[in-house]
Image (tube, coloured by chain):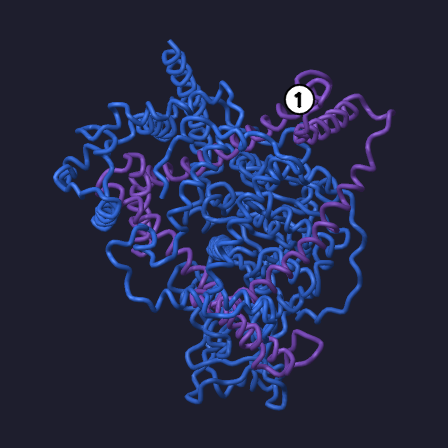
Chain colours: A blue, B purple
Amino acid sequence: MNDDYSWLEEPQPDASQPAAGGSVGQRRGLRRFLPRLRRRRQTSQPADQPDASQTGAGGSVGQRRGLRRFLPRLRRRRQAPQPADQPYATAFLGGQSERPLTELDQRLQALRARSLAIEHKEEWQELYDVDQALTSPALQEKPGGVISAVALSQAQQAQVDLLTEIVGGQADTAQRPAKRGLVQRAALSLPNIPRLLTSALLLLFVALPFVSSDYAPGALPPAEFAADDPQAVAFYAGLDSLSPGDYVLVAVEYGLGAAAELDALTDLALRHIFARGGRVILATSNPIAYLHAQNIIDSIRVRAAQAGLRLVDGLDYLLLNYLPGGGLGIRELSENFADIARRSMGDTPTSLPIDSLLDMKMLLLVADSAEDVRNWVEQALPEAGTRRLYAATSLSAEPLTRAYVAGIDRFDGLVVGLRAAYTYGAMLDATFGIDPQTAAPATDDSVATAPTGGEEPGASNAVEAKPSPTPLPTATPRPTHTPMPLPTNTAVPTPTSTPAMLRIVEVTSPQSPVNIRVGPSTAQATLGLAYKGDTLAVLDTNADSSWYKIVMSNGWEGWISAIVVTEGLVPETASNGDDSASIARERSVMSRFYPRRYGKTEPRFSQANQVPFSTRGAIVQLRERGAEAQRLQALTMGTVAAVLAIALGNLVAAIGALVRRG
Amino acid sequence: MAENTLALISFVLTLMVFSYLLGDLPLIRHLYRSAVYIFIGTSAAFTLIVGYESLLLPFWQDVQNPATSWTVLGAQADRLIFYSALLFAALLLLKPVTRLGWLTNSILAVVVVMGAAVAVVGALRGTLLPLLIATARLPTLDADLGTLLESLLVLLGTLTALFSFHYQVNASDGGRYGLGKGFRTIGKALIVTALGAIYASTILSSLTILTERIAFLFQYGA
C-alpha cells in the first residue's frame, strides 16, 4: 500500500478536467464500471480453470455466470476459518473476499477527486461543520454525554471489541460505562414532558363534558341535515324511499379504528332499512368488519326480539361470507352474486329471490378509507346496472371520498362521522314518530312495551301513514328474472300485553335425527333434520293430524311426522327469546339442523318462527341512546384542545428558533 | 357475568393503551406493548377464524356436494379448482424456505397479476370513464353563477396542482418569475390545503375514538 498521501493536499487536476467525449456522468460510470468488471473476471477465472465463455463448452451464458459466482463462493465456504491476522475486518467476520488493499489508495483518490469536483454551495455550510459538532463536548464520553448514553448489548459490545482489536486498537473495557441499574435507566427514560402535558390537556378537555354538562361547549348538531349539505340530504332521502321488500346491499368496510364513528352509522342505516321494510344483504372484504357486521345485526335482532319483533336470518337479512382479496373479492361478488349468497346460506339454495346485484334496490357502503370506496365503485357499481350508491364514511376518509365521488354519476349520498350519526338519529326519530325530547335510552322496561306488529310486508302501519318521502330519481325497472319461489309466510297474531301461547312440537323420537320434509308424506323430499329435544313452531296440521306443518326461519315451511314429536304450548314471549339463555338455546338448536354445515351456530331455523319482519317504526326506537350528546361535546372540546396544543407547539417552536438565531 | 368480565378486560386494556402517554418508561412501556400484542394477536386469530368458517369450509362443503356447482364445468371441475387453490395456498407457506422461494413467488405473481388486471379494468370502468363523462358535462354558460364559479375553481385547482409537479426549470427566467412560477405556487398552496384537510380529518377521527374510549371509562366507572 502506498504511503504517499500528498493527493489529499491538492486536487488531482485530471480528475476535475473534463475529458474528451462523453459527459461527466458517463465517464464516472465507466471509471467505476470497468475496473469492477476487470476484477470480477479475474476473480471468477482461476488460473487452473479454463474460461467457459472462451472455450464455449456447454451451458448457456446464464448458467456459466451462475457457476462463476457459485463455485468461488462454495470454495470459500469450504476453506478453513480465516486466520486471525487476516487484514480485512469484513473478510474476517464474514468469510468473504474483499478488494485488494492495494487498490485503496486509488479508490480514495478517486473519491476525493469526485468530492472536489462537486460545486460547493453556501447553504451546505452546515454540513461542513459536522466535524466540529462531532467533537463537541456534548458527544464526549462523560456522564450525561451522548456516547455514554448509548447502550450496547453484550453481543454488540463483543463485536465492537473484536473490530477494535482487528484494526489494531485495544478493547478498553475499563472505559465502558457500567451497566445501569433500574433507577438510572428510569432516569434516562423520563416521560416526554411536552407529550405528557399535551396528552393531559387533551384528556382533561375531552373528559369535561362527561363530568358536568356545564362544561359542554357549543351547540349540538341540528336535528336535520342542513340544506347546504345535499349529499347528506340525499342519503337520508334515498334510504327513506325504500319500499317493503326492497333489497339493499350493505358493504361494511371498516376496522376497529373507525368503529367509534361507523358503528353508529351502520346501526342507524340498518334500522332505517328495516323500518322501511327493506331487506339487507351484508357483505365485506374485511374480516374484522365481518365481525362488526355480525355484532350489529345480532344486536338489532336481539333488541327486536325483546319487543316481539323477529328479524329472520336468510330472509330479512343475510350476512354474506367474507370476500377475500379486497378488490378481487368484490369483483367475485359482483359477478357471482347468487353463488356466494347460496354458499353463505349453507348447503341448501337460498330462499332469497336474488341472483345478482341487479336485484338490489341500492348499494350502501360504510367505509373508513377512500380506497374502499374506490374499490366498490370500480368493481361493483359497473355490474349493478343503474343502481345508485350511498356511502357513510369516517372523518379521516371524507376529503378524498368527497372529491372522488363528486364525478361519479350514480353516487347519490354521503354522510360522515359522529355528528352525522347524531343528526341521522334525530331525523329517524322524527320520521318514525319519536319525540326526541322524550326519547330516553332504551331499557328492558321500555322495549318490553314497545309497539309491535305482525303485518305482512307492505301492510299499513304508523310508518306507512306518514307522507311518503320525496322519491329520488328512479332507476330503471328491475330486470325480470326467475328467482326461486319464496315460500309463503303466514301471519302470526300481533303479541298483546298478555303473552300469547305458541303451539310447538318437540322432537321426542329416540331415533334422532328425524326428517323435515317438503310435504306431509315420507315420499316427499327431505328439507332438513331435527334432533331429539329440538322444538319447532307449528303452523298447521294435515287432515288427519299425522303431520305438523312447521316453518323455518329462512321462510321455508316444512312438514314433520307426528310420530316423532310431542305437541305443546309455550308462552310466546319466552320462546321469542329475550334472554341470553333462550338465544343460546336457539343457536344450539339451529346449528344441528345442518349437520354438514361445519358447526356454524347462526340460527338457520327458529323454534318460534313468525312472519318475516317488515316495516316497523319501533326498530328505530329500540336503539341505544346513550352518551351521544356527551360524546359530541367531548369531540368539540377535544378539537379545541387539539387546536390549542398545535398552536402552542408552533408558538414554542417559533420562539425557540428566534432564540437560537440570537 | 360474562358481560362484566368483558367490560373489565376492556377497561384494563384501555388503561394499558393510555399508559403510552407516560412515555418509554421501564415496566410501563410493557403495558402498552402488551395491549398492542394482544390486539394484533386477536385480530390475526379473528381473521383466521373468519377465513376458516366463512371461506374455507363453505367451499369444502360445496365441493363435497355433487348437487351444487359454482362453475359451468361441473362438480369435478369445481373439485379440481378447489384442490388446486388449496395447493397454491399451501405453497405460500413455503416462503421461509429460501430454496423454494420461487414457488411462492410464482403463486404470488399470479395473484398480483390477476389483482392488477382486475384493478385496471375496474379503474377504467369505474373511475376513468365516469370521470370523463362527468367532465364532459361541464356546465354551460347559462348555468347559475355559483355553479360556474365552482367549475372554474375546480378547473383552476386541477391545472395548477398538476403544474406544480412540473419541475423543469425555465432557461430564460430560471423558474423564479413568470406565469409558470405563479401557477406552481397556487398549485402547491392547493395541495398543502388538501393535505391539511386530510390531516385535520384524521385528527378528528382520532378524537372520535378517544371520546368513545373516555365515554367507556366513565360508563364503566359509573
Is the residue marked by circle 1 packed among few (<14), some (14-19), or many (20+) residues within 10 Å? some
User: Where, by quadrant of the figure, is residue A534 drawn?
Assistant: bottom left
At 62% from the left and 32% from the top, the residue drawn is: A225
Give the percent coordinates (x, y) of residue A354. 69, 64
Is A86 placed left or right of A181 in the picture? right
Q: Chain of mark 1?
A: B
Q: Relative to A74, does residue A559 appear above or below in the rendering?
A: below
Give the percent coordinates (x, y) of residue A635. 45, 30
Please tell me which residue lies in front, A323 or A209: A323
| Mark 1 element type | helix
Looking at the image, the residue that sits furthest to the top is A662
User: Where, by quadrant of the figure, is residue A551 drawn?
Assistant: bottom right
Q: Quadrant of the C terminus of chain A?
A: top left
Please tell me which residue lies in front, B166 or A269: B166
Please tell me which residue lies in front, A81 or A215: A81
Give the percent coordinates (x, y) of residue A368. 54, 44
Q: Can residue A232 be spotted in the picture?
A: no
At 68% from the left and 74% from the top, the residue drawn is: B71
Give the percent coordinates (x, y) of residue A66. 52, 66
Check disc 1 and report the residue beneath it: B186
Q: Quadrant of the N terminus of chain A?
A: top left
What number of labels is visible? Answer: 1
Please tell me which residue lies in front, B181 or A141: A141
Q: Can residue B83 be spotted in the picture?
A: yes
| Three-letter residue code for mark 1 | Ile
